Amino acid sequence: MKPDDDYRLKITLDNGEIWIRGNKQGLEYLSKASAQIIGKTDPAGHIHIMPEMGNATIGSKKARIEYSDDPNDYK
């Protein structure tokens, strides 16, 4: 899924706090991309958000969003 031209999404760190800032299209992209990985426990169960992949604006921190149904991941 490729974002459209009006897409804006940026992930930053500010005093140890993660900020995810997006316009309507950026947050919709993040929502849809997250929904697509639900239930996938193979390598398709994650997405990378980073400027190099064209799904984050310049200056954004790299992020990995991953699905997990393993209770040990939440201890």
Image: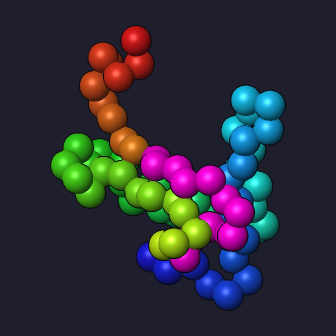
The residue located at (76%, 55%) in the rendering is 21
Q: Is residue 70 above or below residue 7?
A: above
The residue located at (32%, 18%) in the rendering is 71
Q: Is residue 35 above or below residue 56?
A: above
The magenta segment: 54-65
Q: Quadrant of residue 47?
A: bottom left
Main SS class of the magenta portion in the image: loop
For the residue pair 62 and 29, the one nearer the viewer reads as 62
Q: Quadrant of residue 22?
A: bottom right
Q: Is residue 63 shown in magenta? A: yes
Picture quarter with the N terminus: bottom left
Residue 36: tell me if it is visible. yes
Residue 26: tell me if it is visible. no
The residue located at (23%, 44%) in the rendering is 41
The residue most toward the bottom is 5
x and y, in percent, of residue 70 in the image:
28, 25
The residue most toward the left is 42
Q: Is residue 50 above or below residue 2?
A: above
Picture quarter with the C terminus: top left
x and y, in percent, of residue 20 in the image:
71, 49
Q: Is residue 7 shown in magenta? A: no
Q: Is 66 positioned to the left or the right of 42 in the image?
A: right
For the residue pair 33 and 59, the one nearer the viewer reads as 59
x and y, in percent, of residue 57 in the image:
68, 70
x and y, in percent, of residue 30 in the image:
58, 60
Q: Is 12 positioned to the left or the right of 62 in the image?
A: right
